[in-house]
Every structure is written in structure tokens, then in C-alpha cells.
Amino acid sequence: PFDGGKAEGYLLKVGSKSFIEGFEEQLIGMKRGEEKEVNVTFPEDYQAKDLAGKPAVFKVKLLEIQTKGKIEIDDNFAKTLFPDDKEVSVDSLKTKVKEQLQEEKKQEVYNNELKEKLVDNLNAKIVFDLPKSIVEQEMDLLLRNAFMALPKEEQEKLAKDKDAMQAKREEQRENAQKSVRVTLLIDAIAKRDNIQIPDNEVINTIYYEAMAMRQDPKAMFEYYKSNNLIPAVKMAMLEDKVLTTLLDKKV
């Protein structure tokens, strides 16, 4: 057993490649109610390092089989998607879909290009003295992340060389200053413009992230809670919302 390795009533589309390679193929031919052991191996680059490259056995039970049929795109179909909208029709459905696609494309441009440029501009053009203790803490955090990303041999070598370790830490100063400066700016803008992230949005984000990673949402939430990671998630969401709001005013 491992965190996030269990799910019940999961709807899996065979051929979607949303599970580990080799998992879905082993379901083909199963009958409803049948139980089976699925043998797979986690990829070497799997995000959970303790599972990467390791073999695993999943005990599965097939509850039901669904097939995808042909759908007629008419007013009745539109009403099934928007039951609360009495005036919905194929034409209004097309408008809604178009608006959704435009919003998705906008967010794609924001996330892949404009938000990073905006953060760089905020960091470069709004200069003020930073709390030294917070910068030092951020440097320690960045150093830990950089250290953990190194191969084991390099970690052992660096751990024995205090000067090299100090130099590695000093390399993080510029990024640490940027991170602290942007965080303080985001917080100030959020207070100025009354931008907030309700707690239920944070919970929903963690749950959606768990489902996207095919992990147990409750287990992931408890992990975030016990490791005091929820404030960091909330801050990241606040930064995203502030940057989006600033860009919307310009675009």
C-alpha cells in the first residue's frame, strides 16, 4: 500500500493512457464483476521518487462496462448540459463552447508567457528593502530543493565540502530575493484590490490535483494539512489570481 494508490468506483477510459503504461491493456477482456491482479512498473521519472522504477501489483474489480455511443447535437442535448437554463439551444450552446475555448486559450497564453513576464517586470521595476531574515529562510529552502535534485553521489560530495555548500547557497540569493519581493507585492496588491481565496477553493484545488494525479483526494488533503502545506497552496492560488486580474486589466 502507498498514499494515493487506492480508488473506488473510478471511471477509466481504456486507451486514454491516463494510468501507468500497461495497466489499461490488462483490463481488456475482463467481465463485469471479475477481479484481477494488474502487474505494472512505475516509470523511472515518476513524480513520487519512492515509487519511481518499482514494480507494483494493483488488485482491481470491474464494476461495470460502459460504451460510448453517437450523440445527436440538438436542443435536447443542450438542455442536458445546462438543465437550469430554460432558454438554452444549440446556438447558445455553440456560443458557450466558443467562450470556453477562448477562455482556455487566454489562460494558456497567460500561463505560458505573460504571467512570467509580468512577474519579471514587478521584480525589476518595484524595488524596496527586503526583510533579511525572510530572504535567508528562502535561500535555505531553495538550497534544500537544489540539493535534493542532485544525484546521490553529488549530494554526498557537496555535504562534505562546507565552502562548496555555502557557495551553492549563495547562488540562490537572487532567486530568493525575487521570490520574497514578488510574494510581498502580490500580498499588497491583493489587499489593495480586495482579492481573496476562500478556503473551499483551496480544498477543491487540492482535490482536483489529486484526481489529476490519480491519487486519493482525502489522503492528499490530509498530507497537505499534516505537513502545513495548505498556506503555500493558498499563496500560490492568490498569486495566480492577482496576476490574472492584472493581465485582464491590460489585455
Image (cartoon, rainbow, N blue to C red):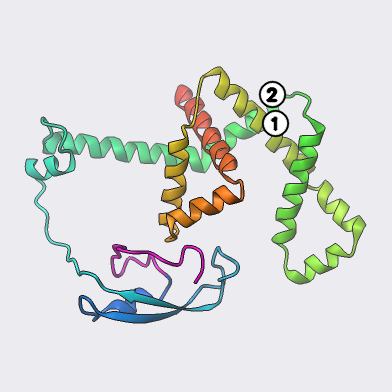
Q: Which residue is at the front of the view, 124 or 204? A: 204
In the image, residue 38 lies at what x, y percent? 38, 80
Where is mark 1, residue-wise?
Answer: 181
Dot 2 crowding, Cα within 10 Å, few <14, some 14–19, many 20+: few
In the image, residue 90 lies at what x, y percent? 12, 39
Q: Is residue 106 above or below residue 21?
A: above
Q: Is residue 16 magenta?
A: yes
The answer to whether the residues at label 2 and label 1 have Cβ atoms under 8 Å apart is: yes
Where is mark 2, residue-wise?
Answer: 126
Q: Amino acid at mark 1?
A: Arg
Q: Is residue 106 above or below residue 69?
A: above
- What segment is highlighted magenta in the picture? 1-19
In the picture, the quarter occupied by the C terminus is top left
Q: Is residue 139 above or below residue 210?
A: above
Q: Which tag, 2 or 1, sits closer to the chain's start?
A: 2
Q: CA distance from mark 2 to mark 1?
A: 9 Å
In the image, residue 33 lies at what x, y percent? 22, 76
Q: Is residue 124 above or below residue 82?
A: above
- Observer-side mark, 2 or 1, equals 1
Dot 1 crowding, Cα within 10 Å, few <14, some 14–19, many 20+: many
> Which element carries disc 2, helix, strand or loop?
loop
Residue 200 occupies quadrant: top left
Residue at position x 59%, y 46% from top? Answer: 229
Does 195 sit left or right of 124 as displayed? left
Does 105 sit left or right of 133 as displayed? left
Residue at position x 79%, y 67% from top? Answer: 154
